[in-house]
Amino acid sequence: MAIIYKSITAHRRRGRAAAPARGEQRLSPDGGPPAQGAQPGIPQLPDGRAAASVGVSHAPARSGPPGIPAGSRPDGQAAKIVEAVGREPATRMPGGQGQDSRPAVIEVRGLRKSYDGVEAVAGIDLEVRAGEIFAFLGPNGAGKTTTVEILEGYRRRTGGDVAVLGADPARAGRDWRARIGVVLQESEPEAELTAEECLSLYAGYYPDPRPVAETLDLVGLTDHRTARCGQMSGGQRRRLDVALALIGDPELIFLDEPTTGFDPAARKSAWDVIAGLRDLGKTIFLTTHYMEEAERLADRIAVLAAGRIVAEGTAATLGGRDTEAAVISFTLPPGVSAADLPPAVAACVTRSAGGHVEADARSPLRLVGVLDAWAQARGIDLPDLDVHRPTLEDVYLQLTREPR
Ligand code: ATP
């Protein structure tokens, strides 16, 4: 039975990477040239059959120390990074508390990728540590898919050093791939198979798969285990995608816009699933256009714009969000003007029109206190008083705003 999912093809097309650019050779999952007769970009099962969208693997049994694929040593470039990481002082924990001694699962230095001489990724550095959820944000065309495909071993880089689980993805083999799960933007599992059958089929390709029942339970599909893939709702299918990525019990999971098209309830339950993966010790590399998703899930966030990382930090600190001024706004009652405000408030006013006042405050509590005392002394109320701190979306939009 030929199991050929269209997912990767569809996904790569959406990412404009379906057809390799002129002079570009798509890598097979094993790092070599695509197998004879294989569809570009579609992973091959051990017997050479094309496989599905998700961490389909073909690996011999896994053994050896974490970070180093079984039966292989990091090659030159990866070894350089692994060696360098070993020597480096541990980085700060998210939020700046303490040292993070967790091993680096993804190490990227000076990564570049050009298509026909046009630089899509212009020299980026990244580090993702074991057990963290790392969110990769950026506007359309920023270079996210290109970067992720290089990390997954599906795309060749133009320059820079990359180590994923201790190996260079461009050269890593099947044992390496067994340790990675990939959830693409779209997938199309075999329509006639039930969820349970589909997972059982894929479990057979892994040396040490997670039990099917446990995997169904993990993604909340136990009640739908006998549903045919072709008859599942979009949300159920997405859960199956995640289940397929988890069936091989990977250490590192790439989630590409995992909740696009979900209703709010489905999105929230997907977030629970993803957070649950972190609880299992998995490392997650997440791309998303939903700021709430990144804020809710990510331990750290990197923002990519025009092929460069423009900010990196936690949701609270990204782009100096924690130190940005808050905006206090209110409307003055008739007969009171901005000129009547106490000096401490007046000095911070940035906008005043038609009685509506906005003031920037580095210490909003202090300014609100002054305003409150002033209003009470005058016997007036400011019913629409609002204190607005920059949201993650505000910061993101500022960071990714194109120069005019
Ligand atoms: P989106 O959010 O829309 O998925 P992205 O951040 O994933 O965007 P990429 O798909 O990595 O962005 O594209 C980055 C740039 O590289 C874009 O300008 C795109 O047109 C270009 N590009 C991507 N793949 C190819 C290709 N195979 N050949 C030529 N140019 C490409």
Image (cartoon, grey):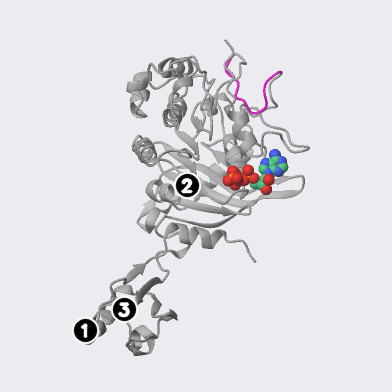
Classify residue 172 by image quadrant. top right
Residue 259 vertical placement versus 302 (above, below): above
Q: Secondary structure at mark 3?
A: helix
Q: Earlier in the sequence, mark 3 or mark 1?
A: 3
Q: Secondary structure at mark 1?
A: loop
Q: Earlier in the sequence, mark 2 or mark 1?
A: 2
Residue 284 vertical placement versus 189 (above, below): below
Instruction: Give the image location of residue 327, x and y in percent.
Output: 39, 71
Magenta segment, principal secondary structure? loop
Instruction: Report which residue position mark 3 lands on.
Output: 367
Is 99 in front, or is 47? 47
Residue 14 vertical placement versus 96 (above, below): above
The magenta stretch spans which residues?
37-46
CA neighbours of label 2 inside 10 A, class few (<14), some (14 to 19), many (20+)? many
Indicate the amino acid at tag 2: Ala
Q: Secondary structure at mark 2?
A: strand
Indicate the amino acid at tag 3: Leu
Residue 43 on the magenta span: yes
Q: Nearer the viewer, mark 2 or mark 1?
A: 1
**What numbered label is drawn on residue 135?**
2
